[in-house]
Image (tube, grey):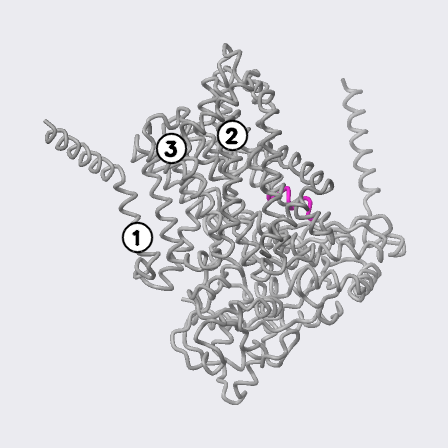
Amino acid sequence: MELFSAFTDALVRIFHPTILLVTFVSTVVALVFGILPAISGALVCILILPFLYGMDPFIGMPILCALFSVSCMGGSITAILLGIPGDNINAATVIDGFAMTRKGQGGRALGLSLAANILGALASIGISFLLIPMIVPIIMTFKTAEMLLIIVVALLFISVLTKHNRIKGLIAAGIGLLLSCIGYQASTGVARFTFGNLYLYEGLETPTVLMGILAMPVLLELHATGSTIAPSDMTGAGRLSELVGGMKELLRSYKSIWFRGSVIGYFFGLLPGIGGAACVWMVYGHAKQTSRHPEEFGKGAPDGIVAPEAASNSAHPGDLLITLALGIPGSGVMVVLLAAFLMMGVTPGPKLLIEHTTLCFEMLLTVAAANIMGAALFFFGAPLLTKVTRVSPYYIFAYLIPLIVLSTFVSREYTVDMIVIAIVSLIGLFMARFGFSAPALILGFVLGKMLETYLTLSLDLHGFTFFFSSPASVALTVLIPLTIFFDHIQRFLGRLLHRKVELLHGDDD
Amino acid sequence: MKTLLTLSLLLAVAMIAGTVSAAPSPAAATDSPAKFYQGKVITINTQSPAGSTSDLWARTLAVYLPEITGAKVAVKNETAGGGRVIENAFATTIKPDGLTMMFTSAGTIWPAFMTGDPAVKFDITKFQYIGGTESSNTLIAVSPKGKIKTIDDLRKAKGLKFAASNKTSLLTYANALAMSILGLDGRIITGFQGSTGRLLAIQQGDADGLVTSPVSAARGMTDGVMLPLVQIGTERTKPCEEFPSMMEIVKADTLNDMQKRLIASIDILSDAKFLFAPPGVPQDRMAFLSGAFKKALENPALRAAMLKATGEDIPPYVSGDALSKMAKQLAARKPEMTIWNDVLNKYVK
């Protein structure tokens, strides 16, 4: 009853005109910043930190919740229309979203993305309300060894992403793992591959690598070919009806992959440390592995858009809930949010959910409200934005190259990042030219550091018995061969079923 | 053409001359400090990321210093190289005009200097210390749900695992010292992701204990997720003064030579927080800044804001001169600092 009363109090509060206004303004800001490449929700939250000092948490919280939860929606727009991920978690959307845009179906891709985003966010908020009493036991189950095994399972999706050429895929993943080794290694206190440059101590920034590997080769190719992103004869492309069609298509044909993407995304949001950048690639691999048309992936497969988009937006409520419940930030943006909470006098931790239940509900409901507002803005703005795909590539090139380089610089203000993006872009160009898998490199890069950290920790803590250190680790160990041999198992089961059906028919005869 | 070249040359000379004459020279500072700072922008750098304790300190000071100094105050998070880039810049390239300073804790820069980190290009005795706060002891804490409930349990336990993050951080050095002095059997596992990773490790049972700051210990106790046992220091300090210092548990005469040397240089584990400026800032500006910092710390509104933001009741003020003296005393012992690396390597495999 108390929970219900806290929920209704929060509901009344978010409909207060002031709260609605600040949520709306923050949503607009988040969408605009989300559209800018390499500028993440975390950076926007950092920029407004000074203004939050001493602010009433019931006003400050909606601002933060809207900023961090909606920016990835803006990032989807550039990922789909321009092939440039607005945020790390939009990177996987580029592969099929941009491919669909190049076929002149940008509006359809945006429709699929919008529906996956909004439904993913709303579903995960619903799950959050249900999970509040169980959140702490769930987190306590996933210790160091379990985290390592999850990362190993995620890495195995490299084999799915590189089915067409495993050797080149493994080379690409190896390059990604090597790039992740650059920087200071905390457990040994040793700096690696930094060449004495202190700016490289923190390693390479994920947005910088994403821009170099995914965006730059596309822009250079556009410039070289001189063709528009979408075929110029697709005059009707990008109409509102196309967007609505994309949304309906999800509800009609891709409910299952949307649901799985949302659940996996939410689960990854709950796990401190792994983050959305790795999760979206894992979900993308899962979608390809379970698709009836895996050969369509990379050429504009709708499930290649739905799965990562559902995962990216459903990770936020899980991430927020765990930060509130344990005071343990699960991602970079949550570290900033945690500081902002403290600045406003709200101390996250086990007592917050009990003592400030209304505030917690208000935050989750604000995430929902901001997503609805963001979706409305997205919906009405998308047809206009789609026109960019028919602009001359020379204008796009001239505008986006400086923007990407500047955005890369702005995130840390290190000159070295501009040199890094030039080098990584060359690697990206080489890979695109010779058919090496960009997703494999990115998955290797985003998981590399975590793999090393959790591997050394697991070996230090348990030795080689970490595979069997708990029931959860045993279950995950079993999942590893299942992931590797998924295709064979699927084929075997298919044959078995087919034979059974034939036998049944034989009996009938 | 020649005329054009001559004109260009003259223009360039004039511009250089103008720039040189317009540049303020610290040595030639004639304005009174109060007049000098009026309307200027003071930049407080911190090598910690946004949201960290040092960042919250800097941002709180940025709110309260303007009314005392008359200057605007900006905060910059300079995290490159784990902060080494900005620390080195303070020793080499930062202009000593009294408008650029850094907020940090001793534990972030002093151990790196003392133990000979090759990336360090600064000398802690050369910095000009504006002022700071007293150091508090770090503590060993365990999970309240674990088997270890007392110091005796801790000392009797075999194969202890302590969760640590960075091998060369202040907390890991403190952990190694405590293990040596208290005679604990076990090792330090490094690589956990920050304070949250370490806390999660003891809650999940991956590790038996950790070393933490007194503020985190107090908060962890309130939340029921941490049970502090002992302070890592020679005598008790606030805010967790109900817990004994390790030298109350171990008799001084039972220590071996190496342990005595470690205790003699225990200042290396100071977590005093302070503001400092690069060498060469005019003395009148330093005095003005020191006074302003002290006045800001005495402001009840600032103390309340800090308590709200960090959960920390600001420790007593320490003058810049006292900090400078401490740094000099510590630096004098630098040649024998290899013992700290020896004790660290003994417990971190």
Which quadrant holds the C terminus of chain B?
bottom left
Tag 1: amino acid? Thr
**Pointer 3 and pointer 2 on the same chain:** yes
Q: Is residue A49 above or below residue A172?
A: below
Mark 3 vs mark 1, foreground winner is: 1
Which of the pair B10/A7 is nearer the observer?
A: A7
Q: Position of residue A324 (x, y in %)?
A: 57, 55
Q: Write down the region rendered in magenta.
A: A42-49
Q: Badge 2: few (under 14), some or many (20 or more) residues near its Cα, within 10 Å? A: many
Spatial CA span between label 3 and label 2:
18 Å
Q: Residue furthest bottom?
A: B253
Q: Position of residue A248 (x, y in %)?
A: 47, 25
Q: Which residue is mark 3?
A: A437
Subunit ID for the residue under disc 3: A
Residue A48 covered by magenta stretch? yes
Residue under the image location 56 percent in, 22 percent down: A397
Q: Which residue is mark 2?
A: A79
Q: Badge 3: few (under 14), some or many (20 or more) residues near its Cα, within 10 Å? A: many
Where, by quadrant of the figure, is residue B215 drawn? bottom right
Mark 2 vs mark 1, foreground winner is: 1
Q: Main secondary structure of the magenta part?
A: helix
Rendered image: mark on residue B346: none
Q: Secondary structure at mark 2?
A: helix
Spatial CA span between label 3 and label 1:
27 Å
Tag 2: amino acid? Ala
A184 lies left or right of A172: right
Residue A247 covered by magenta stretch? no
Q: Which residue is mark 1?
A: A477
Q: Secondary structure at mark 1?
A: helix
